[in-house]
Amino acid sequence: MSSIASRQPWADRKLTDNLPAVIGSIIPAATAILIAVLAGLDFSFALIVIFLPLQLLSAAILGFRYARTRGVKDALLVFGSIFLSTNVFVLLISVLYAVVAQGITAMSPQFLAQNNVYVNTTTSLEYGGVGHAILGTLLIVLMTTIAAVPLGIAMAVFLTQSDSKTKGLIRTVTQALSGLPSVVSGLFILAFMGFAHLERSGFTGALALFPLMLPTVARVAEEALRLVPSDLRLAALALGAPNYRAFFQVILPAAKSGIITALLLGLARVVGETAPLILTTNANNGTNLNPFAGGIATLPTYVYGFLGSGYQTSQLRAWGAALVLLILVGLLFGFARVVSRTKTDSKKSKNKKVK
């Protein structure tokens, strides 16, 4: 019986079953960090000279171990998975460490609340901050959300509930917009601004972010609606409910967590975009809450403006703004994960009660 269960990939596996792979992934990274710290080596040098060879050796040993029990193909899959996933993980940790280590120097209550009206490239970090950029970012993202989320959800509803022949065309356009480079969106709005005689403002920045947020919301919301069992809709119709009531009172509540996830992922998609905002908004060192007139500061353009300076204080301001932006995106993704996980856990608990 145990031999049959071991061959079933869908069977529940214990943590100890994956322990060799976990250890084989951690030891090379820990060894490289320890040697770099003790010997005073540069982390980039330690990553290439120490970590990569050790990780290659560790993945090869684990692959050989699996080859004896599962065959060569499974061994190659294990080798590639461990080697690539660990490298990606280490690179992500390196980026996070760089942003946190540099950005934490500039963090303070004043930095989060003040603007840069009386700040130049050499001003001390005690004065000025990203308060105006945070407000500008939230204002532009809010305007984009108000326009993109209702339309994206409407497109998802149309793609899942309608029998129209234009569904294929709309789905193709949505998929094409998903791969649209952000700078192309900015250039398109910049050309439109010249045609319509619009000045650079928060509104034009929101227009540039709109084509980037719309497909993310539409595709994620479409998948959420497709995951709702068709039996729920059929049961509502069998009880005499019209189509619109079946959708609003049965299907939409069942897909609520997925739609919230679509909203949060759409926000995370556009909150860090830089190129469209550089092309469609003017930088502003002061606080501007009017999105239709004047320059407006955002966190991405703030980072872009200060990071290119040759002065250390300006670069530290850019790192601090990058850390604030990273925290904001992380909170959005984390909240989306919590929402989707809460819904999944509630479904599992209901299924257990039924059984």
Image (spheres, helix red, strand yellow):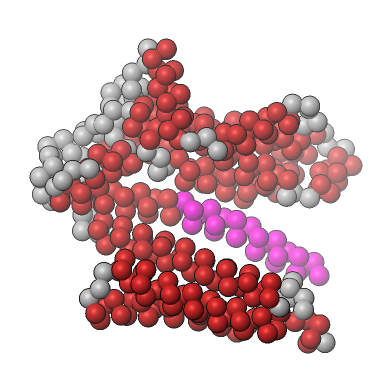
Q: Residue at x 47, y 63 (%)?
A: 88
Number of marks in the image?
A: 0
In the visual, does 166 lie left or right of 153?
A: right
**Which image quarter: residue 292?**
top left
Q: In this picture, is 177 found above or below 59?
A: above
> What residue do we see at 77% from left, 76% from top?
8
Chief secondary structure of the magenta portion: helix
Q: Is residue 174 magenta?
A: no
Residue 275, position in %: x, y?
38, 35
Q: Residue 241: in sight, yes or no?
A: yes
Quarter of the rendering containing residue 183 = top left
Residue 187 position, x and y percent, is: 42, 26
Part of the protein shown in magenta: 331-355
- Residue 355: x percent and y percent? 81, 70
Q: Between 81 and 147, which is closer to the camera in this rendering?
A: 81
Above or below, comparing residue 287 to residue 54 in the picture: above
Q: Position of residue 251 (x, y in %)?
A: 73, 44
Most distant residue in the right direction: 238
**Residue at the extreme bottom of the image, as rendered:** 2
Quarter of the image that includes the N terminus: bottom right
Tell me, yes or no, whether the highlighted magenta stretch contains residue 347.
yes
Residue 291 in sight in this render = no
- Vertical position of residue 309 compared to residue 202: above or below: below
Query: What residue lies at 43% left-to-right and 75% top-to-bottom?
Result: 53
